[in-house]
Amino acid sequence: MALFVRFAGSRPVVQLTSVRVAGCRFQSTQQELDTSSKHVDDEEFRVLNFKQVRAQRVARRKMNKTEVPPPRSQQMATDQDWGAVWPGPKSFVPASVPLPLRQGYVSKKYQIPPGKFANAELMKIPNFLHLTPPVIKKQCEALKQFCTPWPKGLETEERMRASFPVEVVTSDYCHALPTIRNPLSRIVTVQLRVDTLGLDRHAKDKFLRLVGERYCAESGVLTLVTDRCPLKQQNYDYAMYLLTALYHESNVTEPWEDSKSEADMELYEFGRNRAKVSAEGILNWGKKEGEGKEEAPAAYAGVVEQLFNEGENEYNVQKYKEQTLALLGLSK
């Protein structure tokens, strides 16, 4: 007898055939086959699946979502104290600002800029939301106790300029850079009216020659700009040093300046030239030595100096003509 096992689908089927061995013959019966087949069917055949089947899926665990409260800006009262919400300078917080702010670049033509939530443009720039008018007024009231009364005698702008002739101009910049120090903030500008220095004619002439183009003849203001030092305070000290050095150097009279001749003078002076002698000779023509002599009028001396120092133009020539006719007694 031989036993053969064949597979039909996923179930094994046992087939028993009879053979003749040494004169003996064995033949399986139908009952034995039915019993063997029933035993095979009752056994559990475990299947190995590499692909997931719906029936074998594990139920996912339900995630409990936390309820997010609404932004603070929606719960703010209209009469709240803004100084308590935004007491000082800080980065932009969209949930604390009850304003529909928008900022950013849009690629399309009629598209509105991005809103305030998750907006990097609003967070990376400095803001002045803490400097509102009510907060500034409140801070000023708190600082009044440390202030002194305004000095008497400085009620007008003219009096202040007379008492404080030097004006210092500096600049501070607020920008978004890795460093808070701006290179342009080191520049210091000092302005001063030259007439307030009390210089005489010689000192003023020398002072103006030393400063050169830094002096404006129309306004009479001297402007010194210093920017060679890295710090603002250093440039201010250097400007004060320049102003002090210019003042003292202008009042110094060198020994060789007393020996200057008429040709060496920087400006034309009526009292040191032949024009004065000629004008007084015309006025005193025919007078004897004992009689009083007249001096050249100041108006005539002024137009002569103006004609030589400023050059010939229509206005200066006309003034010179009028004063000359008056000197000669020919004016109508």
Image (spheres, rainbow, N blue to C red):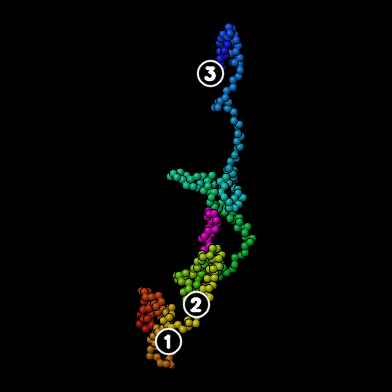
Q: Let me know if residue 261 appears in the view.
A: yes
Q: What amino acid type is highlighted by mark number 1?
A: Glu
Mark 1 or mark 2: name the one nearer the start of the chain. 2
User: Which residue is identified by label 3?
Assistant: 9
On-image quarter of the N terminus: top right
Q: Label 3, label 2: how many angstroms apart (C-alpha)?
A: 124 Å
User: In this orientation, which residue lies closer to the viewer: 190 or 130?
Assistant: 190
From the image, state whether disc 1 or disc 2 is nearer to you: 2
Tell me: residue 152, above or below residue 2: below
* Residue 121 on the magenta segment: no
- Main secondary structure found in the magenta portion: loop
User: Which residue is identified by label 2?
Assistant: 203
All told, the count of numbered labels is 3
* Residue 185 on the magenta segment: yes
Disc 2 crowd, CA 10 A, few/some/many (<14, 14-19, 20+): some
199 with respect to 66 (left or right): left
Tell me: residue 28, above or below residue 316: above
Query: CB under 8 Å between callouts 1 and 2?
Result: no
Rendered residue at 53%/47% (across/down): 120
User: Which residue is identified by label 1?
Assistant: 294
User: In this orientation, which residue lies closer to the viewer: 187 or 30?
Assistant: 30
Q: Position of residue 291 (x, y in %)?
A: 43, 91
Mark 3 or mark 2: name the one nearer the start of the chain. 3
